[in-house]
Image (cartoon, rainbow, N blue to C red):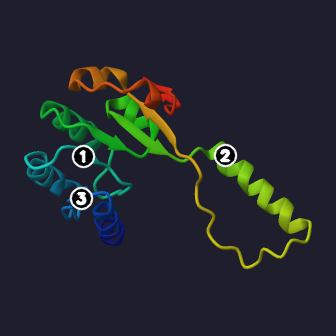
Amino acid sequence: KNASRVKNAVEQAGIFDVQVKGLPVESEKDVPQQLRTLLSDVEALWLIPDSAVLTNESIPFILESALAHHIPVIGFSPEFTRLGALLSMSINYGDVGRDTGLLVKRILNGEGLLPLNPVPIERLKITVNLKTAKFLGITFPNELMGLIDETY
């Protein structure tokens, strides 16, 4: 379901000398075995939106399993951080709404913006679970703490 997203992440990670490893999951029943395989071979676990992998039942299992192996989890929603992921990076919907309003205003004022190209997100919302960080022995330098929008 996310093969192209994973392929793109693998390619982009190479730029930063980071290795991304993705394993196929067809349904929630594949999660335990693939997770065991990953946790024995990774330094962090990055969750991407995928309804086959992430369900109400699998999310706590994934988070607990990763923490049991002292593997930090990076999510895509503050909810993951609240549940125990080390951090998440997500869209700030207030910023998206503001930017959309400004774009509509420019179009209504007659600026020739059509057809519209995708507008990149300028800043992600970053949330950190300080209890998880302490458990994992991870500290964030002060200069990074200033970039964090929310802590749990």
In percent of width and height, residue 69 lies at 12, 35
Q: Residues within 10 Å of mark 1 (few under 14, many from 20)?
A: many
Residue 56 is at least partly visible in this image = no
In percent of width and height, residue 63 lies at 25, 37
Q: Residues within 10 Å of mark 3 (few under 14, many from 20)?
A: some
The residue drawn where x is 81% and y is 62% is 104
Q: Quadrant of residue 60?
A: top left
Residue reaching furthest to the bottom: 115
Q: Nearer the viewer, mark 1 or mark 3?
A: 3
Left or right of residue 22, residue 3 in this image: right
Earlier-in-chain disc, 1 versus 3? 3
The residue drawn where x is 30% and y is 70% is 7
Q: Amino acid at mark 2?
A: Asp
**Element type at mark 1:** strand
Which residue, given by chain and number where applicable, does mark 2 sit on? 95
Left or right of residue 37, residue 25 in this image: right
In percent of width and height, residue 48 lies at 35, 54
Q: Residues within 10 Å of mark 2 (few under 14, many from 20)?
A: some
**Element type at mark 3:** loop
Q: On screen, 10 above or below 58? A: below
Question: Residue 20 got which mark?
Answer: 3
Earlier-in-chain disc, 3 versus 2? 3
Question: Residue 45 got which mark?
Answer: 1
Q: Amino acid at mark 3?
A: Val
Q: How many marks?
A: 3
Spatial distance from mark 1 to mark 2, Cα to Cα?
Answer: 27 Å
**Element type at mark 2:** helix
In percent of width and height, residue 42 lies at 15, 48
Earlier-in-chain disc, 1 versus 2? 1
